[in-house]
Image: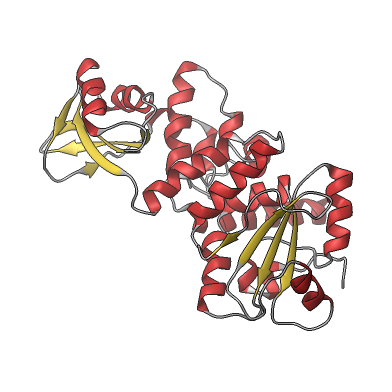
Amino acid sequence: MQKKPTSFREHPELGQIEWLRDLDHGLLLAARENKPVLLLFQEVPGCSTCVDFGQDVLAHPLMTEVIAGQFVPVAIFNNRPGSDADVLQRYGERPWNNPVVRFLAADGEDLLPKLANRYDAGAMFEKIAAVLEMTGQEVPGYFRLLGRDLLIEQGMSETVTYTTPCFWSGETSLAQHPAVITTDAGWIDGEEVVRTSFDPGTAARSELDDYARAEGFLPLACGHFKIDDEPQFYLRKHPARYLPLTPAQRTQINLALPYRASIVDLLSPQQRVWLTAPHLQRPAWGETYRADIRQSWPLVAARFEMAADKYREEKEG
């Protein structure tokens, strides 16, 4: 079995991750680098469930960042003979099956029960966070925020809108409540308001309403919400506005900036690299912080790749 990583570009079932194909080699790397192994059993080429898992779960930029950075990813094709079939038999997995993910220690033993029969990003998030905690690794701040974003994507959040004397300060006040995931400044019938999405598992709506009233805000029962021209006012004045960001990221960054708090832990490793690049703020590139991160991430990556190519050409010329 090859030790060279398999490119995700060859197989949509593999998402946006480069996978090792040799489990024994992966276990050696895990021991050397003190990382767990994320072992994917996947049908390649696969059915719609397999392709959706690759594109919906294994292609989210923040999911791929944590997998590539804090795990040794290994893919076994469950519909191939030879060494793939040997690993399948070793772990008692069925051939021609839907995706299964196991999390292994360097000795090849399971760290916790495998992920099977659930093919959503929320389930993967829960497993990854649990593995990182049990192996003594820090769960990155940006990854915790992804978990909150996924509550919205999977319909597990609620939305409430509040009137505020100033929606820019209203955003930062409401974002400080632990249940609030996102905030957006806007208007309803000419009145400044802040629309929030929150986690009802962290606090009930009544608790959030009490907090808002204490801050001088009142909940609105209805009305057509129109987003302001400058949502996340403080973020919009910062170079991070050129980064691809999730809604939870931009809300927390917008909160951190006026208080001069560090935003480093709110960003993934790649986002930090982009933020420090001198050509990030090229006017022609425009802002990307409000776009869907799944679409804006490859766009920003391509721009930086082209800029790097141009720099190399100028240097060689």
Q: Residue at x 63, y 81 (%)?
A: 96
Q: Quadrant of residue 275?
A: top right
Q: Position of residue 102 (x, y in %)?
A: 67, 58
Q: Nearer the viewer, residue 29 or 82?
A: 82
Q: Which image quarter holds the C terminus? A: bottom right
Q: Residue at x 53, y 19 (%)?
A: 261
Q: Position of residue 73 (x, y in %)?
A: 74, 57
Q: Nearer the viewer, residue 66 or 83?
A: 83
Q: Position of residue 93 (x, y in %)?
A: 68, 71
Q: Nearer the viewer, residue 125 or 91?
A: 91
Placement of 184 over or under 291, stated as above or below: above
Q: Residue at x 29, y 24 (%)?
A: 170
Count of numbered circles in the view: 0
Q: Is residue 122 left or right of residue 317?
A: left
Q: Is residue 102 left or right of residue 317?
A: left
Q: Quadrant of residue 100?
A: bottom right
Q: Position of residue 87 (x, y in %)?
A: 79, 70
